Every structure is written in structure tokens, then in C-alpha cells.
Image (tube, helix red, strand yellow):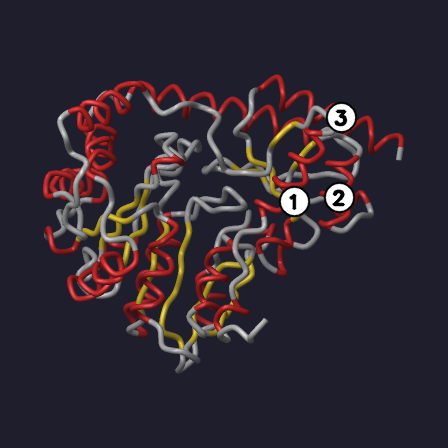
């Protein structure tokens, strides 16, 4: 086979699907596997959202639309942003994308030249690393420390900045740790980006999933209203249980959003109209199903963390948001990879090694609490039993 491009050899993809493939192979062999490896809500999309999409299809909305997104949807995003973040972006600041994941690549491609640096949290979402490498840029990590409940320390962030730093990626609530930064920490990060005149990509996909009443959602966009350097990543997969719909929204400076929109038109043309109609219903319609899902996640979170902390050799900081726990498994004497293999092969529990999310994730694993409370309890007992008998 002929040699591929250099970029082709730098694409890593997402490691969680490798674990899923292995788990599904064991299921085909007759094993009952408890799934905690994917951030895939186990709830169906709320009926009111599905109904609107079906109505849109029946009304013939099956044609091309603007690559920037439906006018009506972007207007709805404007109003939702005003209500949630305190400012109303210009229509030209709003871009509709095929899922929030794609925004990471689009933003890096439009903001960062080959050889320039992007600062990312470690542990952090694997797409950050993969997209940076695919754009031939350099990953610079800032370690998230358990002693600080895995919150990004602004002092550590500023130390990582060099003359080549082009972009900072912020993620709170966090994947994989579930940590939620304080308002003061977020403000410090926003000030650092302004001080050094660096773009700030704020991944806010879990902004609706904060469980600690003492912490409220704050976007660093408060400082410039996304007019100068802040770009917001948001989407519908997690809070709305719409993973398969592939619907995301980016808000940023007009000139950045314009160029990202050209990438959307080049690569995917546009997001289907009926999916965007569903998005309008999601953010403007009945929110009761969302409240119920969030309450259930909160209940599962407590069961999981309490259960993990009851197992000898495992300790777990209680996450304040998102849908993940990030327990420390060093007390078991196993590496992250060894523990993940052990959990799957011996305890029938599919989870991810923490080092899938960066070097600082070694000694940890990620567990998604997107399974029933009964299955969480079963997984805890399986792990307890197998670790005791090991």
C-alpha cells in the first residue's frame, strides 16, 4: 500500500469505542456485560422533541438549508444564550454543526497554524488531543490534580503559556472527571486569555448537568460576549439524550464563525432541517423530562461514588457535574489498563482506563453513570467480589 499523508498517521480517534468493541465481543459469547464505558445516556430522547422532528419530516423539511443553520434555530440559540449566559450574540456569531465534537476540529483548524500550541487539560477529552495532532499543532497539557478535585488551576495554566500558545481549551463540567470549576477560577482563566490575547475554546457540553447546589454554571464568555476571543462549544447529546441526532452549536467572534461555517459547508454541507427543528423544541419546549433525567443522574452519582469508596483499594472524589466518576485505583496495585481489563474480564464491567484521557489519568479509570441504579449496584458488588478474590 502506498504511504498516506502525514496527518493520516496522526489521527487517533476515540479509544472508548475500542473498549465497546471488546465488550460486545464478550456479549456475543454469552457474557452479561455492564456498560459504563460510553458517555451515552440510557434515556430515549424526550417525546416532545421526537414529535417535532417527525412533524418537520412530514412537512417536507428534507432539503438543503443554510450551512450556518436554520434562521429560526439560531434565533432560539440567541435567546437561550441570553437567558443562560447573560448576553445575546449576533446572529452571525452562531453556527450549527453536526454534533459538538466537530466544533473542536473546526475551531482548531481555523485558529491554529502547524507548530503552534494548544493548551488542554490532562486528563481531558480525547478528541482535543486527536484534533490538535490532526491539525499538525502541538499539545501542551496542564495537569488536573486530585488534591484540587481535578479542577483546572489558573496558576498552572498561566505557567504553560509560551510565545507559541494560540488556543486554550477549557472544559467545565469536565469529561472525564466530572469536576466543576469555581466561578473565581473561571474568571481567572478568562482574564488570563485576555491578558495574553489568546483564543479560549470553552467546552460547555455539560453546562446543564451540575449537581452541587453551591456551584452555578458560569461561562468565561461573560468577559467578551464571544466577540473577541471566546468560542463556546455546546450540543444536545448529553443533557437532552440526543447523541444520535448529531446536533451542536458554536458561538464565537464573527470572523471565526464565518470561517468555521465555510468548513461546515465544505465537509458536510449543512445539518438537516428536521434535526434543527428538534433542537428548537429541546431548548424552548417542555423541560420536565430534562429535570427528571438530571435528578436520576444525581441519584446514580451518589450510589456509584459511595459504592466505589466502600471498596478496598479504590477511592473516588465526588464529581460535581457531567455524567462521569474518575476513581483512583492505585490502591489495587494495578495500572489503569490492567484494572480496565480486570473489570471487564473478571467482573463483567466495561469502563475506561484513565490514561485514555492523558498521562495524568494513569492510576484512575472513568466510569459513566449512564446505567440504571440496580446495574450500578451490581457492578460495585462484582468489582468488590473479584478484587477480594484476586
Which numbered circle lies on residue 365? Answer: 1
Dot placed on the residue nearer the N-terminal end, 1 or 2: 2
Mark 2 to mark 3 CA distance (whole Å): 13 Å
Residue 331, compared with residue 4, is above or below; it is above
Residue marked by disc 3: 382
Q: Which residue is mark 2?
A: 339
The furthest residue to the right: 389
State the image quarter where residue 75 is shown.
Answer: top left
Examine the rendered structure and indicate whether residue 300 appears above or below residue 169.
above
Q: Are marks 1 and 2 in contact (CB under 8 Å)?
A: yes
Residue ID at (79%, 44%): 331
Q: Is residue 217 left or right of residue 128?
A: left
Quadrant, the N terminus: bottom right
Q: Furthest residue to the front? A: 1
Quadrant for the C terminus in the image: top right
Q: Which mark is residue 266?
A: none
Q: Position of residue 273 (x, y in %)?
A: 19, 38
Amino acid at each position: 500500500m502506498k504511504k498516506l499523508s502525514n496527518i493520516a498517521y496522526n489521527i487517533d480517534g476515540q479509544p472508548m469505542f475500542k473498549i465497546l468493541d471488546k465488550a460486545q465481543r464478550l456479549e456475543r459469547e454469552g457474557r452479561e456485560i455492564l456498560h459504563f464505558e460510553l458517555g451515552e445516556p440510557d434515556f430515549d430522547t424526550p417525546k416532545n422533541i421526537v414529535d417535532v422532528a417527525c412533524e418537520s419530516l412530514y412537512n417536507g423539511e428534507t432539503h438543503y438549508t443554510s450551512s450556518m443553520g436554520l434562521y429560526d434555530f439560531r434565533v432560539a440559540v440567541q435567546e437561550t444564550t441570553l437567558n443562560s449566559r447573560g448576553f445575546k450574540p449576533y446572529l452571525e456569531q452562531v453556527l450549527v454543526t453536526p454534533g459538538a465534537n466537530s466544533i473542536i476540529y473546526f475551531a482548531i483548524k481555523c485558529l491554529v497554524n502547524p507548530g503552534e500550541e494548544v493548551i488542554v487539560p490532562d486528563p481531558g477529552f480525547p478528541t482535543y488531543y486527536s484534533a490538535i495532532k490532526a491539525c499538525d499543532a502541538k499539545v501542551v497539557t496542564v495537569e488536573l490534580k486530585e488534591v484540587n478535585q481535578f479542577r483546572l488551576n489558573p496558576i498552572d495554566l498561566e505557567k504553560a503559556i509560551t510565545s507559541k500558545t494560540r488556543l486554550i481549551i477549557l472544559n467545565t463540567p469536565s469529561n472525564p472527571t466530572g469536576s466543576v470549576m469555581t466561578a473565581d477560577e473561571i474568571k481567572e482563566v478568562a482574564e488570563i486569555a485576555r491578558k495574553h490575547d489568546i483564543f479560549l475554546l470553552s467546552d460547555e457540553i455539560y453546562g446543564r448537568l451540575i449537581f452541587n447546589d453551591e456551584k452555578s454554571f458560569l461561562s468565561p464568555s461573560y468577559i467578551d460576549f464571544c466577540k473577541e476571543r471566546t468560542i463556546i462549544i455546546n450540543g444536545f447529546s448529553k443533557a437532552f439524550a440526543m447523541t444520535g441526532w448529531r446536533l451542536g452549536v458554536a458561538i464565537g467572534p464573527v470572523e471565526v464563525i464565518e470561517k468555521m461555517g465555510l468548513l461546515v459547508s465544505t465537509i458536510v454541507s449543512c445539518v438537516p432541517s428536521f434535526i434543527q427543528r428538534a433542537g428548537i423544541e429541546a431548548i424552548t419546549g417542555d423541560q420536565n423530562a430534562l429535570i427528571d433525567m438530571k435528578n436520576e443522574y444525581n441519584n446514580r452519582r451518589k450510589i456509584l461514588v459511595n459504592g466505589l469508596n466502600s471498596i478496598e483499594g479504590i477511592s473516588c472524589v465526588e464529581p460535581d457535574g457531567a455524567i462521569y466518576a474518575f476513581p483512583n485505583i492505585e490502591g489495587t496495585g494495578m495500572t489503569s489498563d490492567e484494572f480496565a481489563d480486570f473489570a471487564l474480564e473478571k467482573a463483567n464491567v466495561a469502563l475506561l482506563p484513565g490514561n485514555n484521557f492523558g498521562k495524568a489519568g494513569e492510576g484512575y479509570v472513568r466510569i459513566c453513570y449512564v446505567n440504571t441504579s440496580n446495574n450500578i449496584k451490581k457492578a460495585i458488588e462484582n468489582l468488590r467480589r473479584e478484587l477480594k478474590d484476586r
